[in-house]
Amino acid sequence: MASEFVVSREQPIAAPTGAGAARAAVRLLFVDNIRIFLTVLVILHHLVVIYTGSGGWIYHEGREDEISNILGTWFCAVNQSYFMGLFLLISAYFVPGSYDRKGPVRFLVDRLVRLGIPLAVYSWVLRPLWIYFVLNWREGMPFGSWYSQYYFGAYDFLGGGPLWFIETLLIFSLVYVLVRVLTASRPPRPVPGARFPSSGWLVLFAVLLGVVSFLVRLAYPIDTRFEPLNLQFPFFAQYIALFVAGLVAYRRNWLLSLPDKQGRRWLWIGVALILLFVPLGLLMAETVDYLKGGWHWQAMVYAQWEAFVCISMCTGLIYLFRRRWDRQGALAGELSRAAYGAYLIHEPVITTLVVLTAGVMLYLLLKLAVAALILVPLCFGLAAGMRRIPYFDRVL
């Protein structure tokens, strides 16, 4: 896996001390470890959705109870509030340096290889084969007829399942190339000595993000998406904002300049906000549909909660991993290299095993725990094995 989630293999350290100084490049191990954590969280998130019915997925176990549904909703709501935004932030952080080194043509080719090839192959070959032979084979329609007459009408044309993220990252990267080409006469420069934004600026950013999310959801409530490309517009205010923040963070070296005291404070704010979800959920239990969007105070409160969780957890986790887990042994290094592949293949891997074990009648949360202990290592192990196939490491 590319060191910054398929953006480049080099990672910058401190900003140059002079305008013409070359930026040094080493691996930011705490960023690699954040990526491992987020990939594991994505797999767990989708397992929880499958077993507790707390979100959209191609298959559900279908026997959730009230307790599992409540816990699953809490877990998934917290994840959704920040984890893909943080993924986009740390991916964007390395885009400018990669572009600076490679130039527009080589950078674009690299993006098409590392993002476009997996996206196309998975969307148009692997996913339809898997859906037909694992989920739909009982329907009796020959694969060719099913593929040509049914698949693209019932499923997404591109970016199906979790591959929407790869698709989104590719789109954002293409837009970045276009902007850089159009502004080539004014190349961006590092900002030596730039400080991490103060907590006041972070609060303002969160408030504005919540307001924009609320406004977007007037037209695109939560649970709606642009189906041909599987784009979840209700969350795109966050995704765009965090991607842009990652681009700015690179020039200003924010990942390394975040003060420990500020990072620790925002981590605790994030924990408090996660716990606050419980009383908010009880308060709004009778009007839960209003949270999804529309001119409802509940929709604004939820959008602000989500925005503040996003900013606090992104800031807090960057501090925590930089402070505690800025190192890797052999296992962590292997997990880091396999994380992109694990993300790419986890939909068919986890769903197939869940389908095959549907008849096992364990208590639901116990079954979820057992499945997680098996499937998380399995996804990473399969991805690590795939990287050893000739030429696969160029993509994975």
Image: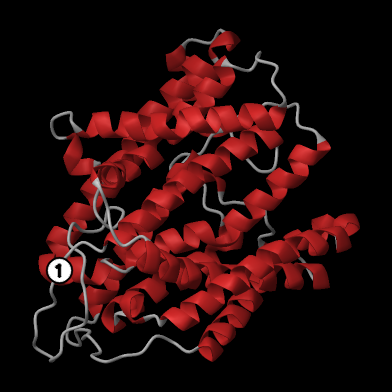
Seen in the picture, residue 224 relative to 118 is either above or below; the reply is below
- Left or right: 394 as drawn, with respect to 167: left
Q: Position of residue 342 (x, y in %)?
A: 37, 38
Q: Is 100 placed left or right of 213 in the picture?
A: left
Residue beneath disc 1: 25
Q: Specify whether residue 129 is in view.
A: yes
The residue nearer to you, when weighing 59 against 343, is 343
x then y, percent, for residue 84? 48, 57
Question: Is the C terminus in the top left, top right, bottom left or bottom right quadrant?
Answer: top left
Residue 321 falls in image quadrant = bottom left
**What sort of colour scheme is used for the picture?**
secondary structure
Residue name at image x 48 percent, y 10 percent: 142
- Mark 1 lies on a secondary structure that is loop
Q: Residue at x 53, y 83 (%)?
A: 202
Front-most of residues 2 and 369: 369
The crowd level at tag 1 (other Cα within 10 Å; few <14, some 14-19, many 20+) is: few
Q: Position of residue 337 (x, y in %)?
A: 26, 45
Name the residue: 47% across, 77% down. Answer: 263
Q: Is residue 60 visible?
A: no
Task: Give the quarter of the image for residue 14.
Answer: bottom left
- Total tally of numbered discs in the picture: 1
Say if 136 sits above or below 310 in the image.
above
Relative vertical location of residue 329 with respect to residue 128 in this rendering, above or below: below
Left-right relation of 26 to 63: left
Q: Nearer the viewer, residue 127 or 91?
A: 91
Type of amino acid at the residue the image marks with label 1: Ala
